Image: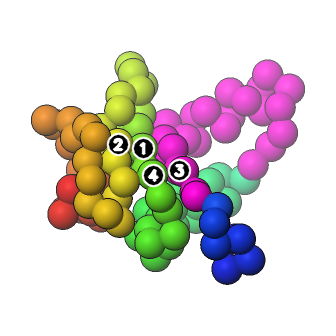
Amino acid sequence: MKKFHPHYHIHVILFFTNDLQLYLDRAFLREQAGGHSVKPAVIRKMYQNTLGLLRKNITLIAHLQLINVTYNRTELVYSGYYPAKISEFVHFNLPQWLTDHFPEI
């Protein structure tokens, strides 16, 4: 998109978790409630590829917010202009998925 519209600014809000089972359970419940079905293998592949794709394309993103998801809550853990290294908010207790893939935060 940036290639064709260089004046556009991409803002990303990513909800992620250390717990793949949370995604699998959510997909199962969605299907049970009449929603669309997604095969567990597809969910696993998307889960495994998400942070790598974010890292690969991070320079295209103007503003990034990262939300940690658990069974009990969702919590903002990072907000900022990542490529410019301007942080608006960094949680004092970062989740493992974030420190493993973005240790510089």
Q: Which residue is mark 4?
A: 63
The location of residue 9, given as percent across then percent down, is 58, 58
Comes first in the chain, label 3 or label 2: 3
Secondary structure type for disc 3: strand
52 up-or-down from 90: above or below: below
The location of residue 26, given as percent across then percent down, is 61, 33
The location of residue 6, given as percent across then percent down, is 64, 72
Secondary structure type for disc 4: strand
Amino acid carrying label 4: it is His
Comes first in the chain, label 1 or label 2: 1
Q: Which residue is mark 3?
A: 12
Q: Which residues are magenta?
A: 9-38
Q: Residue at horizontal 13%, vertical 35%?
A: 92
Marks 1/3: CA–CA distance: 6 Å
Magenta stretch: includes residue 36:
yes
Q: Which residue is mark 2?
A: 79
Secondary structure type for disc 1: strand
Query: Few, some or many C-alpha atoms within 10 Å of disc 4 (few <14, some 14-19, many ≥20)?
Result: some
The location of residue 91, given as percent across then percent down, is 21, 36
Q: Which residue is mark 1?
A: 65
